[in-house]
Amino acid sequence: MALEIHMSDPMCLIENFNEQLKVNQEALEILSAITQPVVVVAIVGLYRTGKSYLMNKLAGKNKGFSVASTVQSHTKGIWIWCVPHPNWPNHTLVLLDTEGLGDIEKADNKNDIQIFALALLLSSTFVYNTVNKIDQGAIDLLHNVTELTDLLKARNSPDLDRVEDPADSASFFPDLVWTLRDFCLGLEIDGQLVTPDEYLENSLRPKQGSDQRVQSFNLPRLCIQKFFPKKKCFIFDLPAHQKKLAQLETLPDDELEPDFVQQVTEFCSYIFSHSMTKTLPGGIMVNGSRLKNLVLTYVNAISSGDLPCIENAVLALAQRENSAAVQKAIAHYDQQMGQKVQLPTETLQELLDLHRTSEREAVEVFMKNSFKDVDQSFQKELETLLDAKQNDICKRNLEASSDHCSALLKDIFGPLEEAVKQGIYSKPGGHNLFIQKTEELKAKYYREPRKGIQRHK
């Protein structure tokens, strides 16, 4: 049965100390224990824009992720909160709250891009939290992270003219939910009332024309349209009077603006009902253990200066999981052979039958735990290791039989040799007595069980 994880509070998943990323092992252990499919919702945006408040609401809590009341950025790195999914049984909702972008205390924005990129790569729904309106700066930032770092490349081939299947492309990228905080503009375009979704689509619509200025305008929009085929927009009024905003997480709903309360409710309802399970190319569902491996893969790659594309991350994940699957299979084989085999076996066939049974079970263990072993290289590695195990146990069986038979012969025939030395059989009729005694001892030797394949030595 899939294990359900209850975290009473969030914890740091990826630490950001002196703008260096480091994975928190305790958080990885929690992820490793989650066998259920995970729905991963990450939020990114400028610092002090209310990201943590929304994530606490998704967790069904008023407090949890740090909600700052000063001009300083509170959340550092990426924090994680795993809770049972409120709508889907046997699924875990993984919430990722990220360090605010644009912190003036940082030396440059490289670290911002890394945090942004990790949130994109790990999530199945990506919440982009901005303030007041959709402007060119917010569009450029989203475009730059995706395009310039090459993080969301879905192509397996360098052929840039290849036509992609939109369904294949969509499987690589999270759904985009754009949240506009403290929205005070009228939702009108050319004098017509529009929905938040129509406002988003209009903001991302390319212009007609081919001159350089139009191309520069269109490039980030075309990029975002391609990367995020599924998009949703939510607007939020100011939650309360300016003086009360510092105590936002402690304010009851009846002290908040009713429109804001309703907007938050609609946002949460949408996330719960529309956010999909994190899925890898090929339709592979991600559970906690696989998410843990993705975290390690991406953080290691980014820390080493390598900004990974998704195919490389999936390959790295496959290598991790398949290597572990091989080890589990070998451990199962060793356990079964250790329980079933007592060396030496009476016949070689007995040993080979036990080996084949354990070998078959080991392969089944591997198949159950393997992941995207496309060219069967890991299965072949397992077969090679099992062949070596067979050769080794046959050799040990031979040696055990030889040692046992030698010890048995010495024990049975030792007194006879001593009697010969003492001349007991050097007298009339002694030869016949010697022959008779030898046959008796031979019979005794052959009656002894489990001498193995060296019993005729």
Image (spheres, rainbow, N blue to C red):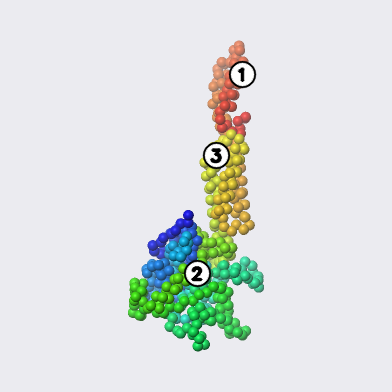
Picture quarter containing residue 355?
A: top right
The answer to whether 230 appears left or right of 65 in the picture is right
Kindly identify the amino acid type of the residue bearing the numbered disc 1: Ile
Q: Residue at x 55, y 64 (%)?
A: 280
Q: Earlier in the sequence, mark 1 or mark 3?
A: 3
Q: Which residue is mark 2?
A: 274
- Cβ–Cβ below 8 Å for labels 2 and 3? no
Q: Residue furthest bottom?
A: 191
Disc 1 crowd, CA 10 A, few/some/many (<14, 14-19, 20+):
few
Q: Is residue 254 above or below residue 280?
A: below
Dot 3 amino acid type: Val
At x 49%, y 84%, the residue is: 193
SS label for mark 1 = helix
Question: In the structure shown, which secondary structural element does the residue marked by tag 2 occupy?
Answer: helix
Q: Nearer the viewer, mark 2 or mark 3?
A: 2
Per the image, the residue denoted by label 3 is 341
The location of residue 427, given as percent across then percent down, is: 59, 12
